[in-house]
Image (spheres, grey):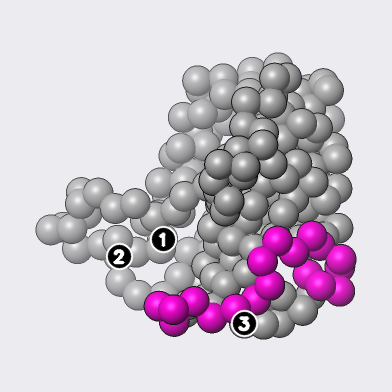
Amino acid sequence: MSNLENLKKQAKQVLRWHRERHWPVAEQLRNTLPELADLNDRQVLDYPIKLADAQRFVALRAGYASWAELKSDQPGPEDTPQDADKPKLVSVQPHVFVRDIDAACAYYNEKLGFTTSFKYGEPPFFAQLERDELSLSLRAVDAYILDAKQLRNKEEELLAASFAVQSIKSLYEDYLAREATVFQALRTEPWGQKSFIVEDADGNLLLFGSD
């Protein structure tokens, strides 16, 4: 499946979430589409969003001025009929449990170089972060159901998420300079992978690896 087809599917998903009144998408739409900037969540979900608006949303989020500009920049042919309906998993998004969204976002921004795309709730209980081609969700829980440090008494290296990266040595040095909490130093595993593990403010372990 071509990248353009994936982008079309993203636009249709945004439109479907809006029609189903999926509250987190309201924040994303408001932060991206200028005509929605002054509306609250309910007003955004009441706004008559069309497919063209959802496509423009996807284009703006990808750094393009319009859907037409995004389409013109996509290489390769469209899907052929024989594989157009073939299912394909294209991405995964970890959900990490934390105690406090604001404190967790500050750590991921300052120490790990992520950008906060949006927070949701008052006070916030959900956030989505991005860095390069990766996205990560944070979810605050009242009763901290996964006390990472306590669990590690039984499971020494229980990971919350794993990330495949390029130029892993440069990333590791960047995290050292940012004074991120390193749980495992950069090393080469017996199977050849280079990896290191950092610990977030709630004790969650995040592995970064490169072949």
Circle 1: is it few (<14), some (14-19), or many (20+) Cα within 10 Å? some
> Disc 3 or 2, which lies upstream in sequence?
2
Which segment did they paint magenta?
175-192
Say whether residue 211 is visible. Answer: yes
Q: Nearer the viewer, residue 119 or 199?
A: 199
Q: Position of residue 206 (x, y in %)?
A: 63, 56
The tag earlier along the polypeptide, 2 or 1, is 1
Asked if labels 1 and 2 touch by Cβ distance under 8 angstroms, the answer is: yes
Three-letter code for the amino acid on which mark 1 is drawn: Leu
- The residues bearing labels 3 and 2 have C-alpha atoms spaced at a distance of 32 Å
Residue type at mark 3: give it.
Ser
Q: Which residue is located at x 20 percent, y 51 percent?
A: 86
Q: Three-letter amino acid code at disc 2?
A: Glu
Position in image of residue 41 (x %, y %): 73, 22
**Label ID, residue 167:** 3
Q: Report how far apart the C-alphas of labels 2 and 1 lie in the structure.
A: 7 Å
Assess disc 2: are there few (<14), some (14-19) or many (≥20) residues with their C-alpha within 10 Å of its C-alpha: few
In screen coordinates, is 77 left or right of 108? left
Query: Label for residue 47?
Result: none
Residue 186 within the segment the image draws in magenta: yes
Q: Which residue is mark 1?
A: 4
